[in-house]
């Protein structure tokens, strides 16, 4: 297709009638995945390449920032080249470079940000800075042109657990977040206690299928009737006490437990976390009168969470429609970065070469 617009001035948006196909190269390095993708018009995925570092962090039971940073340096060039190759696209056909610059591990983010700034300068393309959590929201509605508003979004990942009042792709407003551990972090830590592999979420979900979710009554921390914040450190400690005894002096019983006993702990833990996530999302949806609920982030891959949230949405007074990220876009990827960047591109919201990685969202 012949492009009507080749170059646009920074800070200047484009209207729909002027619009040609817009190809955006997205880059993501906020935690332990090095990812690049080319997405056309925010919805057509031309390529998606992800180099996971799970194997490197496995033995530590969590992400080691220095190891992540070094692996991003090694992977960033091959991953971007592969994304361009798979998309069968040349640099001339790319309209903008987008990068997740916050929140995340700054030593990891800086690799993607530096690569994006370099390409923006060398290829003379506009640069778009993306909030990683806003991108997770976008992953729930990649193929949707329009959704009914008001909407709330639940983003549950290894580093974050947040609820948003979603007004548009560019204006999500934070309603509440975790005051300690993120939900995914709790899955990872409990998996380590149960001596299950890293990352913990998929491992707990798998073994929980063989367990009884009502076997053990783990605490559901609600932080007050009206609170939209989360706390997951208590449940992690409850699992630890269950396995080691209240004084932590007993031997770790996990070694002598049967598979069924471990499955019961995993299923009961998962049920408690899912209950809290669903209850809080219900409260947010009721408060805002939401007609739509979005679910994204690594923990959104969890089937029990998806099912219970669907049931809750059906029962809401507004019978809200639930949009859940496709499983391959729940965990970190660059498709969600490039897709959200399209909305910023249309609105003319660009960054410049002074953009920096930030540990927290602005
Ligand atoms: O979004 P993500 O890839 O990275 C961050 O931005 O943090 O999320 C990774 C997190 C990990 O904590 C992992 O254990 C969790 O998502 N996770 C799951 C499942 N798959 C991944 N948690 C529960 N159930 C799953 N099926
Ligand atoms: Zn993430």
Image (cartoon, rainbow, N blue to C red):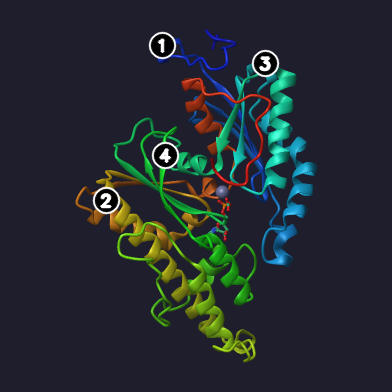
Up the image or down, 205 lies above or below 92; here it is: below
Q: Secondary structure at mark 4?
A: strand
Which residue is disc 1 drawn over? 17
Q: Secondary structure at mark 2?
A: helix
- On the rendered structure, is 124 left or right of 277? right
- On the rendered structure, is 314 left or right of 36? left
Q: Residue at x 54, y 66 (%)?
A: 186
Tag 4 near tag 2, CB within 8 Å: no
Q: Residue at x 37, y 66 (%)?
A: 222
Up the image or down, 172 lies above or below 287; here it is: above
Which residue is disc 4 drawn over? 172
Residue 281: give x, y in percent of width and height.
35, 55
Say whether disc 4 or disc 2 marks the residue closer to the N-terminus.
Answer: 4
Which residue is disc 2 drawn over? 287
Tag 1 near tag 2, CB within 8 Å: no
Say whether disc 1 or disc 2 marks the residue closer to the N-terminus.
Answer: 1
Residue 321: give x, y in percent of width and height.
30, 45
Which mark, by number, is residue 92? 3
Q: Residue at x 21, y 47 (%)?
A: 318
Say whether disc 2 or disc 3 marks the residue closer to the N-terminus.
Answer: 3
> 10 or 296: which is nearer to us?
10
Tag 1 near tag 4, CB within 8 Å: no
Q: CA distance from mark 2 to mark 3?
A: 47 Å
Say whether disc 3 or disc 4 marks the residue closer to the N-terminus.
Answer: 3
Q: CA distance from mark 3 to mark 4?
A: 33 Å
Bin the neighbour count of mark 2 within 10 Å (Cα to Cα): few under 14, some 14-19, many 20 and up. few
């Amino acid at each position: 297709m012949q492009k009507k617009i080749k170059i646009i001035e920074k800070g200047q948006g484009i209207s729909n009638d002027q619009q040609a196909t817009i190809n955006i190269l997205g880059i993501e390095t906020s935690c332990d995945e090095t990812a690049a993708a080319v997405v056309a018009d925010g919805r057509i995925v031309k390529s998606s390449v992800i180099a996971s570092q799970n194997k490197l962090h496995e033995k530590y039971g969590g992400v080691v920032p220095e190891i992540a940073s070094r692996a991003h340096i090694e992977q960033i060039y091959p991953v971007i080249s592969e994304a361009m190759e798979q998309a069968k696209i040349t640099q001339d056909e790319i309209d903008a470079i987008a990068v997740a610059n916050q929140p995340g591990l700054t030593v990891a983010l800086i690799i993607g940000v530096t690569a994006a700034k370099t390409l923006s300068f060398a290829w003379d393309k506009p640069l778009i800075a993306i909030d990683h959590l806003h991108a997770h929201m976008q992953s729930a509605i990649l193929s949707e042109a329009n959704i009914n508003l008001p909407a709330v979004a639940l983003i549950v990942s290894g580093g974050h657990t947040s609820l948003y009042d979603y007004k548009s792709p560019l204006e999500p407003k934070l309603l509440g977040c975790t005051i300690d551990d993120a939900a995914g972090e709790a899955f990872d830590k409990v998996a380590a206690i149960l001596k299950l592999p890293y990352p913990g979420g998929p491992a707990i979900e798998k073994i929980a299928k063989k367990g009884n979710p009502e076997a053990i009554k783990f605490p559901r921390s609600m932080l007050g009737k009206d609170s939209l914040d989360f706390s997951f450190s208590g449940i992690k400690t409850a699992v630890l006490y269950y396995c080691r005894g209240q004084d932590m002096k007993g031997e770790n019983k996990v070694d002598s437990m049967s598979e069924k006993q471990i499955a019961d702990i995993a299923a009961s833990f998962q049920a408690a976390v899912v209950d809290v996530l669903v209850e809080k999302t219900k409260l947010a949806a009721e408060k805002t009168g939401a007609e739509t609920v979005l679910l994204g982030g690594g923990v959104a891959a969890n089937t029990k969470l998806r099912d219970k949230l669907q049931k809750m949405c059906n029962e809401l007074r507004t019978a809200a429609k639930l949009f859940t990220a496709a499983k391959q876009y729940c965990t970190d990827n660059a498709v969600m970065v490039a897709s959200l960047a399209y909305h910023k591109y249309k609105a003319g919201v660009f960054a410049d070469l002074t953009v920096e990685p930030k540990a927290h969202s602005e």
